Amino acid sequence: NLTEQPKRLAVIGGGPIGCELAQAFRRLGSEVTLFHNAGHLLNREDADAAEIVQNTFLREGIKLVLNNQVTKVTYANGEKLLHYECPEERDAIAVDEILVATGRLPNIENLGLDQVGVKTDPRRGILVNEYMQTSNPRIYAAGDVAMEYKFTHAAAAAAKIVIQNALFYGRKKITDLKMPWCTYTDPEIAHVGLYEHAAGAKGIEIDTYTVHFDENDRAMTDGEEEGFVKVHTKKGTDKILGATIVARQAGDMINEITLAMVAGVGLRTLAKVIHAYPTKTEAIRLAAMAYNRRRLSGRLLAG
């Protein structure tokens, strides 16, 4: 709803939305201060990926206030004063506008869901099973109001499952989907499947193959050497369990790995795919070739 550029903008929340808009407003010329309650931005993402974006923000002049708690906002002398506390200080800054990007709550009030036996949770929204079926078996739900993945493409995929299951007696599961997502900062962070920390929490042993873009001719030509392709496989195999890409076109690049996961194609097959030169997607092939080298060296050692 803004009709004028705020000279001074405070952004509360260092998740995807807060980061995307903080960088956008900074590049439009606003002085931006970003407040986050964790030790680094995008703390749910791969830590190496988040560090690249955080360092980019600092170079671009975005002020970061981390490990803090915003306590209140007051208004004095025509200015909004945002008060905060963190281990190093307790202070307040004057800003023109404040963007609150600390998460979203489902809009489920006044729908009469309790009258038809549909259970809800104030934070999770409409409760559904893996078939997108609510506690009333005749009612299904899809989209942000009922899903962990709050993306447009996720809602579209879930809607297809609902139609198949509700109208054609299907048994499609939302848990079977390979869901990619992207944070549209510059560079972008794109991800699909398991993170390394999630695999560890689940007791899943993995191998990780990382290719940095300072080894990629196109990235060097474009002056975009920061970033990487990181692929996780089931330990000792080429089965892809997850991947993270940091690059200006990461959201486009992740689709190749998502396709491989959906098709059951492993790194051994990706290593055979010829990629046009010079492109950043060559880094995906190099990650696959790293698997081949490890496999062959293992055979040589065993021999």
Image: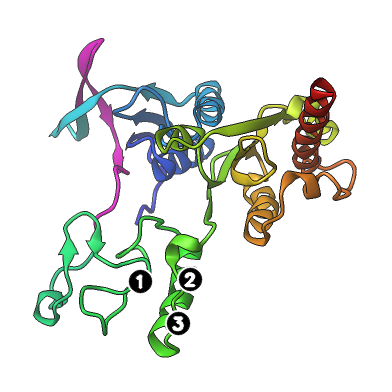
The kind of residue on which mark 2 rests is Ala
Q: Which residue is mark 1?
A: 132
Q: The residue under label 3 is which amino acid type?
A: Gly
| Outermost top residue | 88
- Give the magenta part as a residue range: 83-106
Distance from label 3 to label 1 (Cα)? 11 Å
Residue indicated by mark 2: 156
Residue that carries the numbered disc 3 in the rendered image: 170
Quarter of the figure with the C terminus? top right
Viewer-side residue, 223 vs 124: 124
Cα–Cα span, label 1 and label 2: 13 Å
Type of amino acid under label 1: Met
Local secondary structure at mark 3: loop
Q: Where's residue 148, x and y in %?
A: 36, 55
Q: Is residue 175 above or below residue 229?
A: below
Lower sequence index among marks 3 and 2: 2
Residue 126 belongs to the span the image colors magenta: no
